[in-house]
């Protein structure tokens, strides 16, 4: 009974926090300038959080060290873009390929889901041979696959579909979805003007949030337990009747599905996409987010994703600009120095937090409350619920 | 005569040129506790690995409750290399993977404990209920199987209570003392609802007191879960106490079988364990 009521409280608190978060985002959109750095950090951060969590599902929870994430994001991004470019814009976008092969388009939501499905289908096919490999070999194989995908999408012969190595653009972005029209209308009804509200950040949060929630549910289900068993000991897992090939394939496809969706969201965020942007460096960025957040921690991935984006896009930017203080040039500050500092910070984090910021723990409202009680209210019981 | 649960016929396992198990036939009947003994390197664990499908036997057949788990004959490179017996006897190929075999009702423990290290005692046993699920990916993710999930949890708890690990259910599996880790491994195997339980050296590394407890424990679970048990063991006290019948193997070949008394008196077994001087 006690456990049940605790669960209920947890659920209520979480719901309230989510509503507060969305409301806060709305207020931010209402009052802050749309070019404020915070929006870039929030939007890109939440998209990276989704792809990091999807990678964590594979690397952290199933123990499959895969580096194909950028490839699946690329598939997702292209699927989304190809199916949502408005018909009237296709001639301009596919100017070298006679207006392209596909002459219809699909609603945004369906395209996003299709982006995930497409990535999952590719993952299934790749997984058939590749998932027999273990650890490093799997990493190399998936990395190779991602590079091949990138090359194929840039191939001129596929131009009528992928636009070759040219940009895809003019598809609906985060601030031109049906949702943003709806929220603008509501704002207009309340305040009499739409102001800066586009709903872009809220849309990114809702879409990523739903996906992450599904991944969390999966991890907490009986399948998630089977994944963890495979991670801990393959031989014992198989002896417990867990079909290794099938479960690895499931984890691989689901991880890729959400990578595909995050690719679609990234396309919406960037407004234009080009295959050459989905380099292996992107996979490494995601891997970095996962490792720093803690391999095997969902909330860790989310937190570190925002920190990573904020640091690389915002906080450390000043290091790239040359600066003069009283006529004297500040040493070191020049283009590229940011990356040096960034690398040093990462090394420090890895040295001092061996298992990432969160390890394998999760951040829950109850956990935070207990920590708060422990730290600030002396008489509280010592046991932490942060497990 | 009670019915056969497990039947191995002419099973040969050859790795390259090495014949690890040679033409081994054995039977385990319902409700029996049968031991497999032999000196180090005799091929006992290989027999287990062949039964559970970790290795694919080179020749021979294995049946569980009348269902074929394995039937194989030398193929490919093995055609030339094969050094075992009964080469032409089998013509069918049936190979089942370890998870299929577990599903059919064979559960095992490992010689060197293989628990899921990052998980608690409870989770270790709970995950073994996964194979008896009726939910699919969708219903499991969206908690539409909550009834089954609740049943899984209560059954797991019940099982932990029976094996006496209820009080440590939330502890990390690896933090348990050695004897309890062994017990946990057995509990995890029981959670798969087996007919046949294979125990690979369950008493390894235990002191005499723990060994006595284990003997009682094995008897206990055999009766409670209506199990048939095949075990490998070096503790002769335990083996002689517990077994209905014993098979002794050496260099992969069966050298003797029978009741504990017969085995104790068998000259071949004594020779295998103590060695014989040839030039006398």
Image: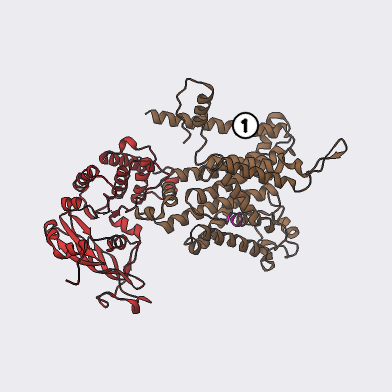
Query: Which segment is the magenta one?
Result: A68-72
Query: Farthest right residue?
Result: A327
Left or right: where A282 falls relative to A221 = right
| SS majority, magenta | helix
Disc 1 element: helix
What hue does chain A carry in this figure? brown
Residue B13 falls in which quadrant of the image? bottom left
Q: Nearer the viewer, residue B3 or B57?
A: B57
Image location of residue A276, percent across then percent down = 69, 58
Residue B22 falls in which quadrant of the image? bottom left
The answer to whether residue A90 is seen in the rendering is yes
Left or right: where B177 falls relative to A308 = left
User: Which chain is drawn using red?
Assistant: B
Residue A322 falls in which quadrant of the image? top right
Image quarter hosting the N terminus of chain A: top left
Up/down of A291 relative to A126, above or below: above
Image location of residue A53, percent across then percent down = 55, 46
Q: Which residue is mark 1?
A: A23
The answer to whether residue A180 is seen in the rendering is no
Q: Nearer the viewer, residue A374 or A24?
A: A374
Up/down of B91 relative to B206, above or below: below
Query: Farthest front residue?
Result: B280
Up/down of A24 relative to B224, above or below: above
């Amino acid at each position: 009974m006690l456990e049940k009521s605790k669960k209920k409280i947890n659920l209520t608190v979480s719901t309230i926090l989510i509503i507060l978060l969305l409301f806060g985002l709305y207020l931010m959109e209402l009052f802050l300038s749309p070019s404020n750095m915070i929006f870039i950090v929030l939007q890109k951060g939440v998209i990276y959080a989704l792809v990091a969590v999807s990678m964590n599902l594979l690397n952290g929870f199933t123990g499959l060290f895969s580096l194909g994430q950028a490839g699946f994001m690329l598939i997702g991004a292209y699927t989304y873009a190809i199916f949502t470019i408005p018909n009237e814009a296709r001639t301009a976008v596919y100017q070298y390929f006679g207006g392209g092969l596909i002459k219809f388009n699909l609603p945004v939501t369906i395209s996003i889901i299709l982006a995930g499905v497409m990535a999952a289908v590719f993952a299934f096919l790749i997984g058939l041979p590749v998932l027999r490999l273990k650890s490093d070999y799997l990493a190399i194989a998936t990395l190779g696959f991602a590079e091949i995908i990138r090359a194929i999408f840039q191939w001129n012969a596929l131009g009528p579909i992928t636009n070759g190595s040219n940009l895809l653009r003019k598809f609906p972005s985060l601030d031109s979805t049906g949702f943003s029209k709806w929220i603008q209308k509501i704002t207009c009804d309340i305040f009499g003007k739409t102001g800066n509200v586009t709903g872009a950040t809220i849309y990114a949060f809702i879409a990523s949030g739903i996906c992450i929630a599904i991944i969390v549910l999966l991890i907490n289900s009986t399948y998630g337990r089977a994944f963890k068993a495979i991670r801990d000991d393959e031989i014992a897992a198989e002896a417990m009747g867990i079909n290794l090939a099938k479960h690895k394939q499931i984890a691989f496809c689901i991880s890729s599905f959400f990578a595909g969706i995050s690719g679609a969201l990234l396309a919406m965020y960037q407004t234009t996409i080009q295959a050459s942007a989905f380099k292996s460096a992107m996979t490494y960025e995601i891997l970095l987010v996962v490792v720093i957040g803690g391999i095997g921690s969902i909330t860790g991935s989310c937190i570190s994703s925002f920190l990573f984006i904020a640091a690389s896009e915002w906080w450390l930017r000043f290091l790239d600009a040359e600066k003069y203080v009283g006529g004297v040039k500040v040493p070191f500050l020049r283009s590229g120095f940011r990356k040096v500092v960034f690398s040093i910070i990462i090394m420090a984090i890895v040295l001092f937090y061996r298992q990432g910021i969160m390890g394998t723990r999760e951040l829950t409202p109850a956990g935070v409350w207990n920590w708060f009680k422990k730290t600030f209210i002396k008489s509280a019981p010592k046991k932490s619920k942060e497990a | 005569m009670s019915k056969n649960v497990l039947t191995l016929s002419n099973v040969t396992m050859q790795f390259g040129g090495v014949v690890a198990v040679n033409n081994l036939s054995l039977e385990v009947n319902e409700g029996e506790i049968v031991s497999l003994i032999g000196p180090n390197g005799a091929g006992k664990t290989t027999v287990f690995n062949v039964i559970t499908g970790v290795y694919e036997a080179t020749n021979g057949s294995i049946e569980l409750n009348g269902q074929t788990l394995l039937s194989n004959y030398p193929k490919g490179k093995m055609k030339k290399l094969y050094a075992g017996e009964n080469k032409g006897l089998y013509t069918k190929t049936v190979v089942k993977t370890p998870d299929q075999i577990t599903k059919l009702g064979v559960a095992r423990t490992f010689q060197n404990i293989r628990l899921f290290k990052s998980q608690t005692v409870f989770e270790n046993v709970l995950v073994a209920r996964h194979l008896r699920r009726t939910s699919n990916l969708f219903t499991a993710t969206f908690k539409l199987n909550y009834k089954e999930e609740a049943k899984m949890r209560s059954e797991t708890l019940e099982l932990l209570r029976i094996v006496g690990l209820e009080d440590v259910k939330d502890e990390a599996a690896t933090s348990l003392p050695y004897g309890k880790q062994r017990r946990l491994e057995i509990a995890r195997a029981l959670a798969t609802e087996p007919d046949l339980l294979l125990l690979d050296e369950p008493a390894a590394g235990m002191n005499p007191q723990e060994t006595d407890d284990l003997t009682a424990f094995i008897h206990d679970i055999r009766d409670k879960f209506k199990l048939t048990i095949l075990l490998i063991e070096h503790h002769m006290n335990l083996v002689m106490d517990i077994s209905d019948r014993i098979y002794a193997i050496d260099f992969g070949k069966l050298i003797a079988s029978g009741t504990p008394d017969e085995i104790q008196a068998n000259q071949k077994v004594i020779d295998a364990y103590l060695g014989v001087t040839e030039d006398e």
